[in-house]
Image (cartoon, rainbow, N blue to C red):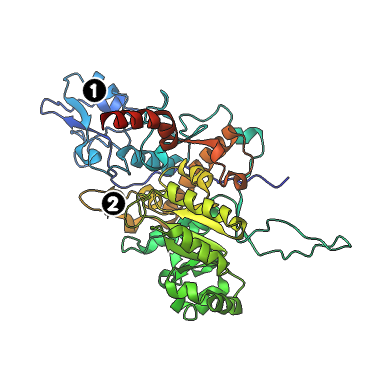
Amino acid sequence: MPKKYHIEINPTPLDLKLVAKFKITRGENCINCGKCTKVCIYEAHKRSEADIRKIAEPYMVACKNCFRCIQECPRGALVKSLDPEFQALGGPYWKPDMFLSIWKQAEDGKVPVSGAGYRGPFTGPGFDGMWTDMSEIVRPTRDGIHGREYISTAVELGRKLNHLEFDASGALVSKVFDVVNVPIPIILDIPSSELITPNIKQAIVAAAKKIDSFVILPAENITDDVQKNMQHIIPLMSAEQVLFHAELIRHARVIAIDYSDALLKNFCSIRESVRNLSPALVIVRIPASSGIEERVVELVRAGVEIVQIAADYCGMEVPGGRYIKDVIRAVHLRLVDERVRDEISIIASGGIAMAEHVPKACICGADLTAVGLPLLIALGALVYQEPEKKIVMPEGIDTVPVAIARQRIVNLMGAWHSQILEMMGAMGIREARRLRGETGRAIFFDEIDKDIFGKLFQNQEAASV
């Protein structure tokens, strides 16, 4: 039996100002007695370093909402309320509590515990409208499912054989395709953005190496400081840049090329150019949009072995339409109908915001996922959806040591890996490869809603006409 895959976590607080869910207001009747500093075991209250006679502003990131300070204040000078800045975070998809969950997992690497059961919505847009056994982790099991039995989260990138052929003497005659093993159905994805400072780029690349996965990085951003980890970097480029980035391709195990009509027409020659430089596998990165099912089929027929379907940051088609779960499912079923599903690996990206989204994406038909925005949130990024998308990195992020930023990303992936194991164990699935297309393990709200109430409402509408 192969050795169990393990991500080593290590508690790593981020010494930057993060937005807290609550704020504590200190009234003018505060006498600076220091009672709050004595009763708060989390050190949310401390005396001012500038003047020890006074109490500093509460450090709300450390606050665990026990209300001890509120109860013990002799003058009733402390008032707790929801922080308006926290309430303004995110939007319809990236809900404020997601940020707290990601920050906490990045800090301690543990499965989030809600304490009193799942209190969230039982349906909603995207992955929220999809239920599985243990789809919402409310607490880890007492000893962890993965502590009791072997569950593999490994997947492969590349074309797979759907059957084997042997000659009369029993020798294998089928061509075995090259594949790349990934021990967790997640690869990292660095967005091409000015927000990515050199230290953050180095940290994400180092994290990919630490968890033995990959990171997709625009080729022009692969500088000398990260090239030592080329075995874990997937350089992203256009078809016209293949020869220009020949040196990167020579050292890469996988490369990614942006989709274009020209690429589809000339993929064989482009693939041959890559083969002359390296045995690297090729990913074609295609935006999730209307008609993507037919384009993916055409890519398979052209010889493409891996496709990354890229939705927007809310997991929507570009322009808006279907959610990524519906896009993946439609593409998967189209490939099954064409009897070519095993000839390609599908990477789902965009809107992968929580650990549960990974196995849900695989159930819909993906082989694995690419995660980008949660990596930045783990490092303190704030996302605002309305009135338009805006990502704000915390002040001082460029001074955070690479080792700290790397460990926070590793912690986040460690927490997600534990949750994936719990979900797989609850579904009775022991290999992540078997998750692909296993829609029988899930319930889709839209479908059961239509089955149960569709005919009833149709009859009412017909009667009113």
Q: CA distance from mark 1 to mark 2?
A: 29 Å
Most extreme residue toward the right is 169
Which numbered dot is residue 70? 1
Q: Which residue lies at the image location 33% right of the left edge and 63% below the top edge?
A: 193
Which numbered dot is residue 394? 2
Q: How many marks?
A: 2
Most extreme residue toward the left is 28
Residue 237 vs residue 228, the one in the foreground: 237
Residue 115 vs residue 20, the one in the foreground: 115
Residue 356 vs residue 140, the one in the foreground: 356
Mark 1 vs mark 2, foreground winner is 2
Could you tell me the amino acid type at mark 1? Ile
Q: Quadrant of residue 345?
A: bottom right
Which numbered dot is residue 309? none
| Percent x, y of residue 87 | 24, 38
Above or below residue 158? Residue 222 is: below
Q: Quadrant of residue 210?
A: bottom right
